[in-house]
Amino acid sequence: MKLSDPRIKQMIRQRSLYMCLECGKCSASCPRMTAGKEYSPRLLAQKIIAEQEDEAFIENSVWECLTCALCEERCPSDVEFSRFIVEMRALLAETKGLTGYRAHDGALHSWMRLMTSPELKQNRLGWIGPELRTASQGPVAFFTGCAPYFDVFFSGIEVDTLSIVRDSIRLLNFIDVDPVVLAEERCCGHDLLLTGDTENFKTLCQLNYEELKKAGVEEVVFSCPECYYVFDRYMPEIVPGYDLKATLLIDMLRTEIDKGGISFRPLEKRVTYQDPCRLGRLSNRIEEPRALVNMVPDLTLAEMENHGRSANCCGNSGFINCDAYSKAIQLERLKEVKATKAELLLTACPKCMIHLTCAMRDPVRRGSLKVAIRDMASLLAEQIEWSEEAQTRRLAKA
Amino acid sequence: MEPVKILGICCNWSPYASYNAAERAGIEMPANFRLIRVMCIGRINQALILRAFEFGADGVIVLECKDEDCRYGPGPEIGHTNVHRVRRLIDLLGIGQRRLVERSFFAHEKEKLAEAIWEFTARIEAMGPNSAKPSQEREAS
């Protein structure tokens, strides 16, 4: 990296780093810092502006960040730290190669790069059973993301990410949407973007756009907040003439429920909810998921100590920095879950599910932090029903 | 016929002893076959096998010790798990399970090892190059 690169100056200005007051709120809230890691967003901001000769420090810090955006949530000067980090990584990768540490030795990034092949003939739809109604052409698509791959790769920790996409499609079917599920859908590329591999990220965006267009899709529905974030924020900047509408499944459900006729079967359970960074702070959906969960009668939503805008990260993002500090963050998070006395932990992102399930299996804790974990979509799919009156109306229509 | 690239990932102990013996005995190996020697197949994870495909291999053969023959203990069993999972992953990717195989050998099986490599090479040559290759070529880093 040449720190004299004019793009750095531009980033500093664009992401408001000059506005930093050095108050240190960012470092005090940073989950990695509070877990004990020698990493400080404040110091990084200071060094990149005033002490650029400390290249090693800057470089290490750029790869440390979880981009969970808790620092920018609390920053009084509105420094856009997570965007800054992602842009710095792209610059570092461009000049120094993809040197950042990647968890699982970069296996996930490998398959994402393999997906940039235009001649790819995937075999990814084996999980669609006869109980799900899907289409190959139509105006609305459901984006499954990497779930089929996660299920194989993480089969060792017994995490069922495919249940999330199955239950999401069940929910869509319930509201009479038979979504297009692409046979050649690629990864959204979020993790490549976070490792600085901009070129392959852009290729994936372009390929996904073309595949969706070929199927006549106008609106894409997501249950994974990372895929949504990419389609909502990055795709319009990358794909020329981008005209797809990105919708979160929870938003779509909410609209349908507001039309009336839908109710939920009661469930006597105490649950708690983990805010995914990219859904909560970065896409501003704090109340929406809670409102949906609260619609289930008899269900108690017990909040963790850090929740909503202050929610802690699941310890890892983009499969980059998994280490002892990530583990410490996850264990702390699980202790907060335990403190709520909830019987069930709800998540809304497959990655939160993977990381927290992995941490529950920590051999030193001997299962003391174990708690049932499910995606919100699965809970809703199980409890949703037509109210009696709506049911008769539907039957009459049919 | 288009040229294909075959990679062997070989355990340092029994299979490599066989490979070494085969070379010394003058047994010919396919020209498009490359070998990586590792200390134990238990050292290899899913990422390293996947990366071979990412970097352009058309077929990967994992050469390991017999289960009871591992110098360290669980090597081959770890290998079976990893190969099994990566086979499922490359099946999802459409590369095809048949492009990744594992074969186990004792230290004295030079003919068997050479035969296995030739057989696998012939299979991949018949299948042709793997079409699922990253659009941007990677250099080893």
Image (tube, coloured by chain):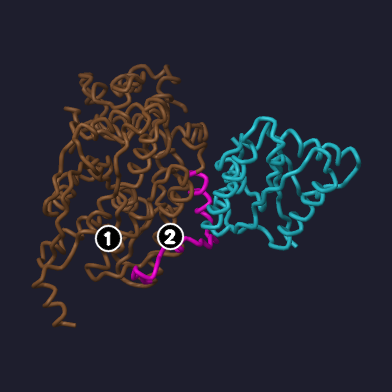
Chain colours: A brown, B cyan
Above or below residue A44? Residue B134 is below
Mark 2 surroundings: few (<14), some (14-19) or many (≥20) residues within 10 A: many
The picture quadrant where one finds residue A330 is top left
State whether residue B97 appears in this view.
Answer: yes
Vertical order, A246 against A112 (above or below): below
In the rendered image, the quadrant that contains the C terminus of chain B is top right
Camera-near label (2 vs 1) is 2
The residue tagged 2 is A185
Q: Amino acid at mark 1?
A: Lys
* Rendering coords of residue A395 (x, y %): 16, 80
Question: Circle 2 — which element?
Answer: loop
Q: Which residue is mark 1?
A: A245
| Position of residue A57 measured from the top left corner of the image (x, y, whole percent) | 41, 19
Where does the magenta region start and end?
A: A108-135
Where, by quadrant of the figure, is residue B78 drawn?
A: top right
Tags 2 and 1 touching, CB below 8 Å: no
**Chain for mark 2?**
A
* Along the viewing direction, whichever of A234 and A303 lies nearer the viewer: A303
Query: Which is more toward the observer, B39 or A54?
Result: B39
N-term-proximal mark, 2 vs 1:
2
